[in-house]
Structures are given as C-alpha cells and as structure tokens.
Amino acid sequence: MALLSVVIPSFNEEAMLPAALEAIPASLEEAGIRYELIFVDDGSNDRTWECIARGAKEKPEGTIRGVRFSRNFGKEAAIFAGLASAKGDCVAVMDCDLQHPPKTLIQMYRLWEEGYEVIEGVKRSRGEENAAHSFAARVFYRIMSTSTGLDMSKASDFKLLDRKAVEVLLRIPERNAFFRAISSWIGFRTASVEFDVQKRAAGESKWTVFSLTKYAVNNIVGFSSAPMKLVMWIGVLTLIFAFLLSAETLVRYFSGSAVEGFTTVILLLLVLGSLILISLGVIGYYISRIFEEVKGRPRYIISETL
C-alpha cells in the first residue's frame, strides 16, 4: 500500500498539537490510508517539541516523526525540511492548527490515486478573518497572480504532491522559495479540492500584521520582478510629466507670463526625490536578496530529530 507523508509545520503550537495528533490519524485510519506525520518544530519557545515527542511514543512506531530546528527559520523552511524528510509516495502539507480540515486529505489522496500529481487545496471561504486581513490577502494574491501568470486568488499551503513533484521542488536551489507559488509553477497534472477554512480550536494565530506584511513583501520580491517593473513605469510616467511641464514652462516664459516663486520647483524636487529614494530602496531590496542567495547558507539547521 502506498505511503502518505503529511508535513505539518509547527511554531508555538503546544495548545493545538494534542488535537492534531488525534484528528489527523483518526481521519486517515478511518479511510484505510497508510501514513506518517512529520511535525517540523520551527524553533518554538513553548512545549511544542515535548508534545511531538509524547505523540511519537503514544502512536504506533513510525507513524509520528519530528524535526526540530535550531532556531526559527520560518514556515517556508519548515515545509521544505518536511519535504526532505518525507518517505511517502505522496506528500501533503497542512497547518497544525487544523484550519485545513483533515477530511480533505482523503479527497486529495483519492485524486492522487487517480493519477493527479499536484492536488491544490482551494479555499472556498476564508473563515473568520477580519476585513482588513481579507482585503490585504486579496491585494497580495492579485499582485502575485498578475506578476506570475498563475491564478493564486484562493491559494494556500494545503497541497498534496506526488513524489515526482516533491523531488523537483527539492532540486530547486532557491534559498527563499515561496512554496505556495512554486508548487503551482512546476506544473504536472493538477487537480483541486475546495475546503472551508476551519475555526482554530485552541491557541492564537502566530501571524501579526507586521509578520504578514514582511511575508508578503519577501514572497513578492522572491517570486516576482513586479516591483522593479513598477519602478520603471513610474519613471516613464514621471518623464512624460516632466516633458509636459517643461513645454508649459517654456510657453509661459516666451509669452511673458512665467510662474513666479519657487513653490512649483520645491514640490517637484520633493516628488522626484521621493521617487528616486523609493526606487533605490526597491533596487536595494532585490540586491539584498541576491546577496542572500549568493552566500549559499542553508535554508534551515536541524538540531534534533525523532
């Protein structure tokens, strides 16, 4: 029988781990699916690792495995560490907070048995998100969809991948890979399963406004050149505006009605100066990402496994 590996990134999920350790195996065992769960402790500072170790002792041998990072390296690193550790013929990725319903794993697995190699979990609804978060998410995915040519309007990390797709992902040398986008970019025979984001039963989301903003900026820059193109088009529009303003100024000068004072000049200097500094900032951010890639440091460091 084929083996399904389920990769579960976990960061300070002490409150949710007992529920995950019960709900996910129960669903898979009921469906008769042979499985292993790989919990990746992303540098938690609570008792997440102890909960994983306890679960590994309580469950049948080999069904629960753990990978512990030396520090917090981020969710993308945790996902790739789980993919590298997985032994299954197919590998699913889901959140530890059970907002990705375990029952949906069964639908994904059945589609894999039919020959599909990438099965996407597509959000039918986003659960109890506040309005600001939902709006920011829509803007982010609109930018990503436009810049990559992939429809990411309802994308999530909830996916099931054939071993062939997993091996391709692991061979990609990027240190800051955006799993949600790159797993769609690789292609293969793809299907999708809709799901409703479930309410978190315990604990709180570890995502703050700052961390979500940083996550969005990092992934837009890491997977797309859209900000660089935007800077170029702003430069083109500014040049057109400068030509029009120059023509108006010359006409006024030769007609004897030139604009008096320095208000216009000062405003132009402020606008142009701001655009230049923003443009340099965007370019500098891309250069910093190039610098990080060139250094070739590992995506993550594993301190312990079980």
Image (cartoon, rainbow, N blue to C red):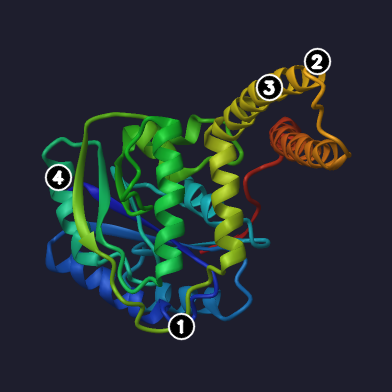
Secondary structure type for disc 1: loop
The Cα–Cα distance between marks 1 and 2, rounded to whole angstroms, is 72 Å
Q: Secondary structure at mark 3?
A: helix
**Crowd rating for badge 1 (residues with CA inside 10 Å; few <14, some 14–19, many 20+):** few
Q: Quadrant of residue 238?
A: top right
Rounded to the nearest angstrom, the CA distance separating label 1 from label 3 is 52 Å
Element type where label 4 sits in the image: helix
Residue at the spot x=34%, y=49% of the render?
Answer: 155
Label number found at residue 254: 2
* Label 1 with label 3: CB-CB less than 8 Å: no
Question: Which numbered disc, 1 or 2, marks the residue that appears first in the sequence?
Answer: 1
Q: Mark number for residue 70?
A: none
Q: Residues within 10 Å of mark 4 (few under 14, many from 20)?
A: some
Q: Nearer the viewer, mark 4 or mark 3?
A: 3
Q: Residue at x 26, y 75 (%)?
A: 23
Marks 1, 4: nearer the viewer: 1
Mark 3 vs mark 2: give the one in front.
Answer: 2
What label sits on residue 203 in the rendered view? 1
Pointer 1 and pointer 2: residues touching (CB < 8 Å)?
Answer: no
Foreground pick, 69 / 198: 198
Q: What's the CA distance linking mark 3 and mark 2?
A: 23 Å
- In space, the residues marked 4 and 2 are separated at their CA atoms by 75 Å
Residue 104 on image: x %, y %: 20, 60
- Looking at the picture, which amino acid does disc 2 mark? Phe
1 or 3: tag closer to the N-terminus: 1
Q: Amino acid at mark 3?
A: Leu
The dot on residue 239 is: 3
Instruction: Identify residue type, mark 4.
Output: Leu
Do callouts 3 and 2 mark residues in contact (Cβ within 8 Å)?
Answer: no
Identify the residue under disc 4.
Answer: 111
Tell me which residue sits at (71%, 40%) in the image. 297
Q: Please, what is the three-letter code of the amino acid marked with disc 1? A: Gly
